[in-house]
Image (cartoon, grey):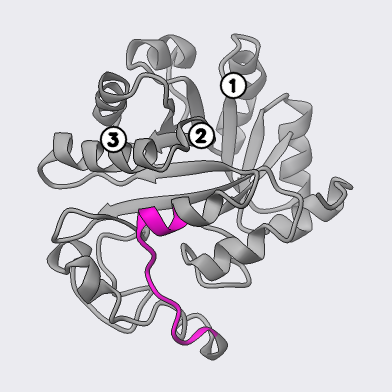
Amino acid sequence: MDIIAHRGNNRYTPENTLAAFMSAVKYPIKGIEFDIQWSKDNIPVVIHDSTINRTTNGSGAVRSFTLQELKQFDAGSSFKESFRGEKIPSFAEVLNWSKDHSLKLHVELKQQSDNHHLFVKSCVNEILQHGVTHSVIISTFYHPYIAEIKKQAPEIETALLTKTPIFRGPNYAQKIKADGIHIRHSFQSIRYYRRWSKKNVPVRVYNIKTIREAKICKLCGVDAIITDDPRAMTEDFGLSDR
């Protein structure tokens, strides 16, 4: 079972920053997960929320700032003073950084309010231009994006995101052209993991907070867990350093 660092090593470093990703790869993980929003000048940037309020020293919608303007805000000191000066990275910066690491990049596209086709195109173009097509898995809660991704670049692996089990999940995934299912861990969801995995659909489970939950996922045959604490998870499963 693979271990994926959720927004980087976000328990100990500011989420969705290069510092978080560099910290995460100190552990024998197989991937990192991060989120994409769109700047005012239509550049994909790495940040979870639609506003910069929670994770920076600024306020306002991500979409209301150009990339250059977003770079003026501090994305580290609100987490811890020692991270002062950390910036919101562009998608391109993370893709460049990733070339020095053997990782799968689990890229969540956040739903935008408009220009859906162009938003997806800008993200896909970055992946193609950086030559990392086979290192990326794109996931999203906004399932119409998945067909758009496959239309633009069918070779890019995709996954639907869901907070709750979906009736006939593998059939639904096939219908919307998703290659895998990413689902929030819950007592209700557990009984679906093995069932879906037996259908040869990659199942990756997020919101894994404890070693016990991770062990349950492993017993149920899931492909990967997405966790805020890659250090604890990798140490418990006895994985050696790369």
Drawn side of residue 163 relative to residue 237, left or right = left
Residue 9 visible in this rendered orientation of the protein: no
User: Dividing the picture into quarters, in which one does residue 192 lie?
Assistant: top right
- Locate residue 242, reporting x and y percent: 81, 49
Q: Does residue 93 belong to the magenta stretch? A: yes
Where 39 sits versus 171, above or below? below
Q: Residue at x 33, y 43 (%)?
A: 126
Q: Secondary structure at mark 3?
A: loop
The residue that disc 1 covers is 192
Residue 101 visible in this rendered orientation of the protein: yes
Q: Mark 3 belongs to which amino acid?
A: Tyr
Tell whether label 1 touches label 2 (CB within 8 Å): yes
* Figure quadrant of the N terminus: top right
Front position among marks 1 and 3: 3
Front position among marks 2 and 1: 2
Disc 2 from disc 1: Cα separation? 10 Å
The residue that disc 3 covers is 142
- Locate residue 22, reporting x and y percent: 61, 64
Mark number, residue 183: 2
Instruction: Mark 3: give few (<14), some (14-19) or many (20+) Cα within 10 Å.
Output: some
Q: Does residue 18 belong to the magenta stretch? A: no
> Tag 3 or tag 1, which sits nearer the N-term?
3
Q: Mark 1 belongs to which amino acid?
A: Tyr
Drawn side of residue 189 relative to residue 146, left or right = right
Q: Secondary structure at mark 1?
A: helix
Q: Residue at x 44, y 37 (%)?
A: 131
- Locate residue 82, reporting x and y percent: 56, 89
Judged from this view, the residue extending furthest toward the left is 114
- Locate residue 188, reporting x and y percent: 56, 31
Bounds of the magenta segment: 83-94
Disc 1 from disc 3: Cα separation? 21 Å
Instruction: Mark 1: give few (<14), some (14-19) or many (20+) Cα within 10 Å.
Output: some
